[in-house]
Amino acid sequence: MRLLSIDILRTVAIFMMVLVHFVENLASGFGMPPTDTVGSFHRWWLPTGLAAPLFTFLSGVSYRAWLTVQRQRGLTDEAIAKGTIRRGLVLFGLGLAFNVFIWLPEDTFNWDILTLIGSALILLNCVRRMPPEVPPVLIVLMTLLSPALQLLADYPAYWTEAYFDYDFTLADVLLGYLVVGYFPLFPWLVFPVAGFIVGRALPPVSGADDQPAVFRRRLRLGLVAGLLGGGSLLLQGFVQGLPTIGGWTMFPASTSYLLGMLAVVIASLLLLHRLVDGTASAVAATGLAARLADSCRVISRHSLSIYLLHHAIHIWPLWAFGLASTGEPTAHWRTVVSVPVAVLLAVVFCLASVPLFRQIDRRGWPTVEGLLRWLA
Amino acid sequence: MKIGRGAMDGQPAVAAAPGAVPDGLPPGSRIETAALPAAGELLRIPADQPGELLSTLVDWAAGSGPASAPVVIELYGGLVVWTPQRAAVAAPAGRVEKATGAVCEFAATAAELAAIEREVAAAWQDYETDLPAGFTGSSDSRRVLELEARYRRSMSLAGRLSRLSPRIHLPAEHPPTLAGQFGERLRDRCRLADREEFIDDQLEAIIRLYETCAQRTSDRLLAHREYVLIWVIVLLLAAEMVLLLVDLLAAAGG
């Protein structure tokens, strides 16, 4: 059973990601003097920092739903573990291959979101065996530990030009994976684990769980979201002296950012689930609403393909143009077009992706999701 | 001495109105409503020749409802006709008070025993459902509460039966009295001692199951707590390792 709320949120996450990547990779330094540093968060309207938490959180929610389905199919624990680890390893390998082919070999170990989700799946295979009281402890520990780790690893030393710049040494590669990369385990694993916990509050496929218990869980989660949001505001208000705790930064993911984004993603899921997942509203959806819902399902089903495709479609021409014009592939990175053009390109891509993937579904062409299912 | 059971003459019972003394009884006869358990009626008759009233009293007692045929005990110039809803005691004026007391005490004992029997019979359905929990226990909080409630109910029934037991196994008075004899014969005729023994056996089986459930559930709870603690310790150790590793890597990289 697919939940429309998850499909909508994943679609929103993907579209935000497309917009942010198009603008940042094509236009974030457009028109700036070469001496200026291109920093993050310089455009207030750009939803930087929203998509990745949502995407990784939903991977945890989806894993919980997948787990329920596998158990209902009567799969043994061992089979589920093997399936999970295979999926995790395939995603991890795909992430590395993506880095090589999209960001070129020198950025093989920049630790993008696919390697994070692959690692998260392998960790979730362990988390699912824990008693329900333990995963929240894991989240708290990771949240508390992360600022200390960022301090120990000297995070700013790896981010001098607003991107992760590492040496090809074992120490840097491992530190990138653990703490200082784009999406290191600390603290980004918090989101998939939180999604896995929150997934319990969504309706089970069989409907066997009793409604009052589910309602109580949702109420508790709503309160937790409120507390997390409040905690984030408090940290921003009172711990401004320590940017890794009180600052609102995605790189590094500060504690207040972590708490705030957790509050946002939990509240969004609960709210949307309440609004659109009811049987009556799902059945009654007709016309434009039904078409939109169907589009969200298509995008959500092919989110991995879209993630890969949107990179290929705007990065490869950029590298080709750079190579052709200057001999250096990255020569025009961030400066090739103006921001409105980049936004327009992102919108065109998003609009075109729906019919494209509908067509792919209709014709039964192979996709990355199909490959993942076949391999794992 | 005459001890009999059932309607004496085979005539259909004529129900007297509740609270109304049947016709043909000696003066001084009176009905005490709610003298017996479950608002039963007690008819008290001071009479020197109670045997003559037998058929009237049997008809009166049998007219109380669909209960089984009345128990009739005629003994040493006294007569008792008893159903769970109605009881008639006829005895010479000087003995009627004590005889009535003995019948009331018996009625209370029999009613309590019947109530326990009904509750034990109902408990057997839960017993079958709860058998698996006797082996594995339960971790579901609602289920644990259910099992706890059933354990408490079983223990409560056992307690009630224990308190009832002295009244069932009351030794015969010496020298014998009419009241004592009535009580003893009534207990004997209604097989209170046997029924108490059967119920005791049944309750033992039920309690054994719920004690096992409690033990298993408690074991599970303790094991779960230890399991949580172990995981938390593992996480703390892992955190320490990560801190150490990052420190080492940072030193190596720097």
Image (cartoon, rainbow, N blue to C red):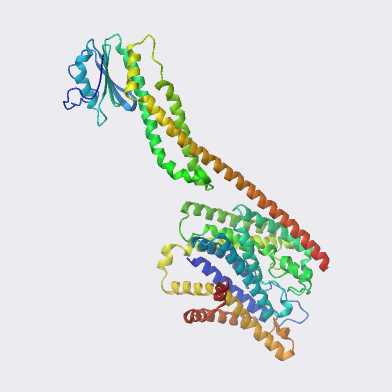
The residue sitting at 30% across, 8% down in the picture is: B94
Which of these two is toward me, A368 or A305? A368
Locate the C terminus of chain B and report the quarter of the image it occupies: bottom right
Residue A92 sits in quarter: bottom right
Instruction: Determine whether, in the image, residue B27 is placed left or right of residue A98.
Output: left
Residue A301 in sight: yes
User: What percent of the width, then of the height, locates residue B121?
Assistant: 38, 36
**Residue A109, above or below A207:** below
The residue sitting at 58% across, 66% down in the picture is: A83
Q: How many marks?
A: 0
Which of these two is toward me, B179 or B212? B212
Residue A241 in sight: no
Residue B14 sits in quarter: top left
Which of these two is toward me, A263 or B40? B40
User: What percent of the width, then of the height, locates residue B122?
Assistant: 39, 38
Locate the N terminus of chain B and report the quarter of the image it occupies: top left
